[in-house]
Image (cartoon, grey):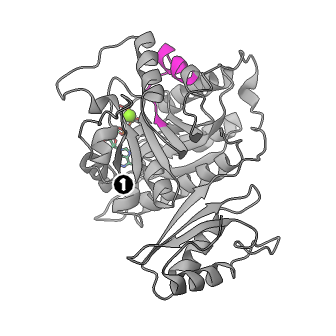
Amino acid sequence: MSLIHAGREQVLRRVAAALSQVVHPTTGEDIVSSGRVRELNVDEDGTVRFRFNLHPEDPATLVRTARAAAEKVDGVARVAIQHSLPVAGKPAPKSPLRAGNVPAPTPDAKLLPGVKHVLAVSSGKGGVGKSTVAVNLAAALAASGLRVGVLDADIYGPNVPMMFGEHRQPRVTAAKKLEPLEAHGVKLMSLGFLLTDDQPAIMRGPMIAGILKQFLQEVEWGELDLMVVDMPPGTGDAQLSLVQTIRVDGVVMVTTPQDVATGDVLRAIKMFERVNTRVLGIVENMAGFVCPCCGERYEIFGRAGGQRLAQQTGLEFLGEIPLEVHVREGGDAGLPAVLGQPESPAGLALRAVAERVAARLEGAEARV
Ligand SMILES: Nc1ncnc2c1ncn2[C@@H]1O[C@H](COP(=O)(O)OP(=O)(O)OP(=O)(O)O)[C@@H](O)[C@H]1O
Ligand SMILES: [Mg+2]
């Protein structure tokens, strides 16, 4: 495909020139002639758009450098980048917990044909911030240009509608499929969109797997770089059947710093390892509260349990998110903290976790 489409020629030429000054830090290749920048275009309102084909050896900062270079060009109002995560990659690292594995689940390969990576956000315990982390990762990665969807697999207590501030019912297409709703640039599907507020979701394991399969087969997800699955709490049959229904490429485990939570998370990690599902790393949420009045830090849920767990399991520690009132308020109001208060300590921490997760997934083989 030609680099330059039609129209707005001058701005396009200037942006193309600016981008060809951006070079890979070790190979010295520029990002235009090496084919990383594709489908460069500019809208009437001055929005510059292009697709960035990340290579496996590229640092995650390369896209940011490209964005900064394009933003500096005269006549550019906004830069929207779509990433393509690289196809080639390293195999998942062996974890010390892999002993006693059972054969890998064999989910239906025809499910989600247009989705490159599936990431589950999980924990052994309820209320530790799985949904908060899932929603913020999705919003942060969508804001950085990835095509992202969120599947709310918490059938009992679906929170995705509230956390994205989206409460409409999905449309049914001519092909009798459900159209995902969209908020903050993220495609969404949740049982919450299909139930009325006072309707309890009382279901057993096999019914959950059935609903989930429908969410995969009968929802028009289209092309996505990443689908984030917000998992329900626990390590029972329901969680196992979820993993066996969807081919999950990586799991982010969320814990609070206290030991009881980390014990539950350890059980959950073992469950995923047993079914050969790769755990990407551990996020410690609600890690300390800094009093806005006196600046004193209080370790409400204990200290550093996530880091201890990472050491114990040999998994990567992906970061700690402090307890901040606006994170909860943003969740209730449908504006994820990474968008509402991106420069707050929690906003920065969540964005850093999102970058690390994206970088880890870059190392995983794409599904398509
Ligand atoms: N870092 C944080 N700072 C402040 N509030 C937070 C933080 N993380 C989560 N919360 C709040 O804690 C509550 C529980 O979080 P969340 O719903 O994300 O947990 P969960 O693990 O998904 O729960 P469940 O097991 O019920 O699905 C929510 O009200 C959320 O807004
Ligand atoms: Mg939740």
Which residue is found at the position 26% from the left and 46% from the top? 332
Mark 1 highlights which residue?
184
Q: Is residue 232 visible?
A: no
Quarter holding the N terminus? bottom right
Q: Position of residue 39 (x, y in %)?
A: 59, 66
Kind of residue indicated by mark 1: His
* Image-based side of 331 in relation to 95, left or right: left
Q: Is residue 239 visible?
A: yes
Which residue is found at the position 59% from the left and 84% from the top? 13
* Image-based side of 362 in relation to 15, left or right: right
The answer to which of 284 and 71 lies nearer the viewer is 71
Q: Is residue 60 above or below residue 259?
A: below
* Image-based side of 295 in relation to 226, left or right: left
Quarter holding the C terminus? top right
Q: Magenta segment: does it hold 134?
A: no
Which residue is found at the position 56% from the left and 72% from the top? 5
The answer to which of 107 and 34 lies nearer the viewer is 34
Q: Is residue 191 above or below residue 366?
A: above
Instruction: Tell me the quarter of the picture where residue 179 sits.
Output: top left
* Magenta part of the chain: 229-243
The answer to which of 350 and 62 lies nearer the viewer is 62
* Image-based side of 108 in relation to 129, left or right: right
Where in the image, quadrant-wise, is ligand 1 located? Answer: top left
Helix, strand or loop at mark 1 = loop
Q: Magenta segment: does it hold 234?
A: yes
